[in-house]
Image: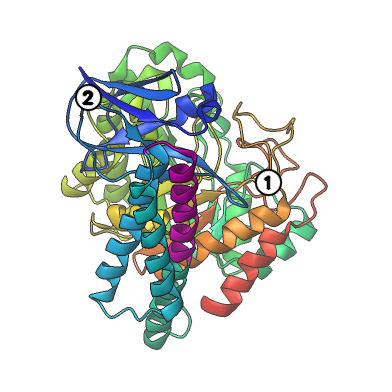
């Protein structure tokens, strides 16, 4: 067993909540299985391996909340590392490496960025020269972190501006799909007007639980109406997911299949066939399956999830070969692997499906920002950009499904019991995060669809306050942000 130790300043920061969110990755970005604990002001990580790796931890950043920061790649050693110092070194190294990588393809940066990098480097140097773990060293390291984050923001801003300029020279109006999940019911008139003003696409959900309430008996009414409404308004349509791997999406009568995978595969195939035959020619893309890496559907094994996903893709493609097909993965940073080890990390799972020749033409990733557990921890736009490129290495288009909260107070209509950082979440914060994330997503040519996962807080939903319309059906500022992006950039 491997052990790594970090001196944390202040020690009180290591709460039980933070300990549950810490994880450690190898060079392949796959989290190790770890046990994190605190003792005598130190963070102690016990691992089943002794490989070198990087620590990832939410860190308090004024005005931004607990952003995930990471160290560089560290080896095991008897003496502890000083965490603020290593986080400063890690963030600065990330900025410098990315600047060099983008510079090699022609990115031009302002003097202010180079000055920020030089200033952060100077503070880091002073922190390393001060007495290890002293107040002076910690303060200097914190200063280096803040300046490195400023440099990170400047760097991403330059990249986004120049990448979008290149894309617009090739096509004045970008073909990226921008839409939202329409939810389980038809939109009321005022919401529908705002929707069409904002989006060029729609995700029409085809939820097995709601449609096949008893074996072999289907109720397509709402899906039919949503399909017709979307097509009449010229919206591009993503249909699905056909199979959603969360237990709450499975028909109750399927409980008889628990432990009988062959029967489940049969019933799932029948449903997929019925849905695809009914709506082929009416959708512009199929989401064959979602949350294939994290869903707890009937306690399926990893191998069974792979088989069911493959069957759904294969059947959809066979029945509608001219329409793109996608499979969606939740929590793309895979933080959950630190306490829930699996044989198939999500990118490896996706790569296997892409290479299998099943007809899969796109991969989706679901980013539910700030929610824990079951969501994606807060990360700055540079970290987002790097992770998108990591998934983009699969060589197929990406669909991004996004949720960002507008509050952290109790939400009686939210089904998932998750937590949010207690301060800083409000409608304007949601708008700000949406603006930053949308800019990065649009700058990536391989991101071909951006779908907001929850549209309305006025109906039952999964994540608290994640809609674009509040409980009184009023549009939130984030909706205006999305409308502005469409007007400025999209068809």
Figure check: 294 above or below 177: above
Viewer-side residue, 151 vs 303: 151
Q: Marks 1/2: CA distance? A: 39 Å
Tell me, yes or no, whether the two marked residues, 1 and 2, touch with CB atoms within 8 Å. no
In which image quadrant can residue 25 be found? Answer: top left
Q: Quadrant of the N terminus?
A: top left
- Circle 1 is placed at which residue position? 424
The majority secondary structure of the magenta stretch comes to helix
State the extent of the magenta-drawn residues as a range: 132-153
Above/below status of 243 relative to 103: above
Which residue is label 2 attached to?
A: 78
Viewer-nearest residue: 252 or 138: 138
For the point 34% across and 21% down, the residue is 300
Report the side of 124 relative to 231 (left or right).
left
Q: Seen in the image, is 7 located left or right of residue 314?
A: right
Give me the residue at 45% from left, 52% from top: 145
Query: Residue 80 at what x, y percent from top left?
Result: 30, 29
- Which of 343 and 455 lies nearest the eye of the viewer? 343
Q: Position of residue 465 (x, y in %)?
A: 68, 42
Observer-nearest of 225 and 366: 366
Q: Residue at x 69, y 47 (%)?
A: 406
**Residue 189 percent coordinates (x, y):** 78, 58
Instruction: Identify the mark at residue 293; answer none if there is no mark.
Output: none
């Amino acid at each position: 067993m491997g052990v790594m130790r970090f001196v944390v300043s202040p020690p009180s920061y290591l709460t039980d909540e933070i300990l549950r969110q810490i994880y450690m990755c190898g060079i392949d970005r796959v989290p190790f299985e770890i046990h994190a604990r605190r003792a005598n002001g130190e963070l102690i990580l016990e691992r089943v391996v002794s490989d070198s790796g990087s620590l990832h931890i939410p860190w308090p950043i004024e005005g931004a909340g607990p952003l995930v920061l990471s160290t560089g790649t560290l080896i095991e050693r008897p003496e502890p590392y000083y965490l603020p110092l290593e986080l400063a070194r890690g963030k600065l190294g990330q900025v410098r490496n990315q600047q060099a990588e983008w510079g090699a393809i022609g990115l031009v940066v302002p003097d202010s960025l180079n000055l920020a990098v030089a200033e952060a480097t100077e503070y880091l140097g002073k922190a390393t020269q001060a007495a290890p773990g002293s107040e002076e060293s910690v303060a200097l390291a914190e200063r280096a972190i803040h300046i490195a984050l400023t440099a990170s923001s400047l760097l991403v801003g330059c990249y986004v501006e120049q990448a979008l300029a290149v894309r617009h020279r090739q096509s004045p109006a970008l073909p990226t799909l921008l839409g939202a999940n329409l939810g389980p019911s038809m939109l009321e008139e005022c919401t529908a007007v705002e929707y069409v003003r904002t989006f060029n696409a729609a995700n029409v959900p085809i939820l097995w639980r709601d449609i096949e309430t008893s074996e072999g008996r289907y109720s397509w009414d709402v899906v039919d109406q949503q399909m017709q409404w979307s097509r009449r308004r010229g919206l591009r349509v993503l249909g699905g997911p056909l199979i959603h791997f969360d237990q709450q999406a499975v028909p109750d009568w399927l409980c008889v299949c628990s432990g009988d995978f062959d029967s489940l595969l049969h019933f799932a195939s029948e449903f997929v066939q019925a849905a695809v035959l009914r709506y082929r020619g009416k959708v512009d893309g199929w989401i064959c399956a979602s949350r294939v890496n994290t869903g707890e559907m009937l306690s399926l094994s990893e191998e069974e999830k792979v088989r069911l996903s493959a069957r759904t893709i294969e059947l959809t493609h066979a029945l509608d070969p001219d329409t793109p097909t996608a499979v969606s993965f939740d929590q793309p940073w895979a933080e959950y692997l630190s306490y829930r080890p699996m044989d198939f990390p999500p990118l490896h799972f996706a790569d296997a499906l892409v290479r299998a020749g099943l007809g899969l033409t796109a991969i989706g990733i679901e980013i539910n920002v700030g929610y824990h557990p079951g969501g994606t921890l807060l990360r700055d736009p540079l970290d987002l950009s790097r992770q998108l490129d990591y998934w983009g290495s699969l060589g197929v288009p990406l669909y991004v499904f996004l949720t960002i909260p507008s509050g952290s107070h109790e939400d009686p209509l939210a089904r998932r019991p998750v937590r949010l950082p207690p301060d800083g979440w409000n409608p304007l914060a949601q708008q700000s995060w949406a603006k930053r994330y949308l800019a990065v997503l649009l700058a990536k040519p391989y991101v071909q669809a951006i779908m907001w996962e929850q549209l309305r807080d006025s109906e039952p939903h999964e994540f608290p306050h994640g809609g674009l319309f509040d409980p009184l059906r009023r549009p939130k500022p984030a909706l205006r942000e999305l409308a502005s992006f469409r007007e400025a950039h999209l068809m």
